[in-house]
Amino acid sequence: MSDAAGDRLFADPELDWQSVSPALVTERRLPVAVLALLGLGLVVGGVVARLSGNGAGWPLVVLGLVVLAVAALLWWVVVPRVVAAWRYAEREQDLLVSRGRLQRRLSVVPYGRMQVIEVSANPVSRRLGIATVMLVTASAATDARIPGLPTDVAQRLRDRLAAKGEAAAAGL
Amino acid sequence: MTESAPAYAETELSPSEMHRLHPLTPFLRSWRMLGAATAIGFGFFRDDLERLKFFWDALRGDAELSVLFKAAVVLFVIAAVLVTGAWLSWRATGFAIVDDGQGPGRLRFHRGLFVRQRSQIRLNRVQSVDVNQPLFARVLGLAVLQLDMAAGDDASVSLAYLSVKDAWSVREEIIRHTPNAPEVGALVGEHREDELVAQVSTTRLVQATLLESVSVLAFFVVWIVAVVVIGIVGSGQALLAGLSGIVPVTIAILVQLRKVLASILRDADFRLYRTPTGIRVSAGLTSTVNRTIDTDRIQGVRLEEPFLWRRLGWARVEVDVAGAADSTQAARLMPVADRPAALALVRSVTGVDLDAGGVRRAGRRARSLDPVGWRYLGVVLHEHGAVSLRGRWRRSRVYVPYARAQSVSVRQGLVQRRLGLASASLDMPKGIGSWQARHRDVAEAADLVAELAGRARAHRAPPARGSG
């Protein structure tokens, strides 16, 4: 219905939105690849069972194909879209993080409320040269996480946020 | 703030300036262990004890008596060791309030028999000092002094056990060292001088609790009747079938009843006092709790009206306080009161009238997402905080101050997207029910987010006491 309004809410065109690195797609596809391998294994197993005359091979093949289809959907549709929908914008006084495709979310975190800014990277993301920046406030409900930032961008963002946080320091 | 020992190692407290905890502490501390030892001992000697079924038999043969004797000796030795250990550790435990004129007063706390722990607490970081009496301590006339520290410091320190009189005098001594001392000074002399604001009679508390849990109780009655009827009328097999279901349901009901009973015990003899910096709550039948609530630290207030209370015009008030030790239990500010009194209470601690007009209701489109309660969803933005309303049967109003909001978020699911709705919320540091503006029109949600974010930014929490 009024999707234009929704777009304006979750991705205000007047703001300078930064998207995350496409390398995040690669990282998020990794578990999907594992799933795809599992599906493939099921299909092969089913076919082998069938050929060796054990009979009950078809259910396995069907299950494997379903798994493969799900993996394909995740690989080509879901992961790229989710990653594309993840973005952030720095405003004068606060940071905006917008994410989600089916369920859209937007978090507005005033710089003064940030307690810790965490930059982390698991082995895979280190390989890909990306890192996750996470803002921690006194509230566990604050959900401001920006994954998939190129390492140098992440570090600069962290420093910038830290400086702004200090300037706006407003206790609890 | 607890600082580690080295810097103060040379100023070891001498026994003369050290306050000891109450001498009964070791027994109270080890009563669980004693119980466990008894149980273990009993298990260990059970076979032998069974032979003693008839004491007269035992008297006839020496062998059995010696077994009993052995058991008694072993138990006695275990008990003696435990109590001695506890006593030694009690001897090594002590505290002192030090005010040497340099810097703020400090509470120094020594403990540990083998691993010595020397900690000290800067008293200007103390947020509240509560005197609690758990059941067993209460029987012996003892109390636990609980210190809550400013957020970010080690959450709390408890001095257990002190005699009730000592606990109150130490509390006053500590309060004298907190930054607000001058205004407090005149009043701390005697805690009983705090002005009694409100009190809940036990009759009313019981009525209210029963009314609130009436569905469980009704179920309980129906269940008992059903079981009895099955027992009388039914054949053996029907009874068996009924019995198979009895155990889990009975357990579930008992758990609920226990909750009801626990809440009555906890809130019994509820008294509310006004203190210079806030409010003091004293409550409890078996274990008494004395909780000081600093109005500056309130980060959420909830007014609840369960369905059956509304006819009687009753309401309950709960508060959420920053840095409180027992975060599991939202503090009851008033377990049950007449609605106007409850509203007045909320107004006195937050300055906000929860019944004020200007409610922005959710629109008709919310109906398909919340067919029962959509009419009752709403928000009010006040100057220093916001109220959110919800609940058709059980009405609840939550007030949060902007100064404590950590971030603003808004989310939109698939259905909401189709309807052009979104839900906004204020993210608070843990809480009793969150502040939410559910199912608002998207454009309105956008305005709300902008407004809330702006207000949250503009309102700063007063700095934690003494943190500067």
Image (cartoon, rainbow, N blue to C red):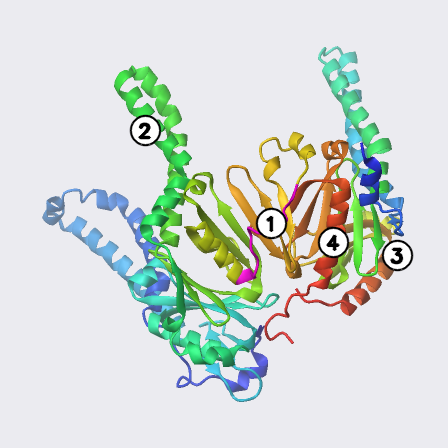
For label 1, the SS is: loop
Question: What residue would you read off at disc 1?
Answer: B357
State how far apart marks 3 and 1 are (Cα).
48 Å
Cα distance, mark 3 to mark 2? 67 Å
What is the three-letter code of the residue carrying label 3?
A: Val
Residue at figure coordinates x 28%, y 24% from the top left: B228
Magenta stretch: includes residue B316: no
Mark toward the viewer: 3 or 2 = 2
Q: Which residues are magenta?
A: B349-361
Is the stretch drawn in magenta largely helix, strand or loop? loop
In front of the other: label 4 or label 1? 1
Q: Give whichever of A27, B183 is nearer the camera.
A: B183
Residue matched to label 2? B224
Q: Work out which quarter of the rendered image holds the C terminus of chain B and state it.
A: bottom right
Q: Is residue B401 visible?
A: yes
Disc 4/disc 1 C-alpha distance (Å): 19 Å
Task: Name the residue tied to disc 4.
Answer: B451
Dot 3 falls on which chain?
A: A
Residue type highlighted by circle 4: Glu
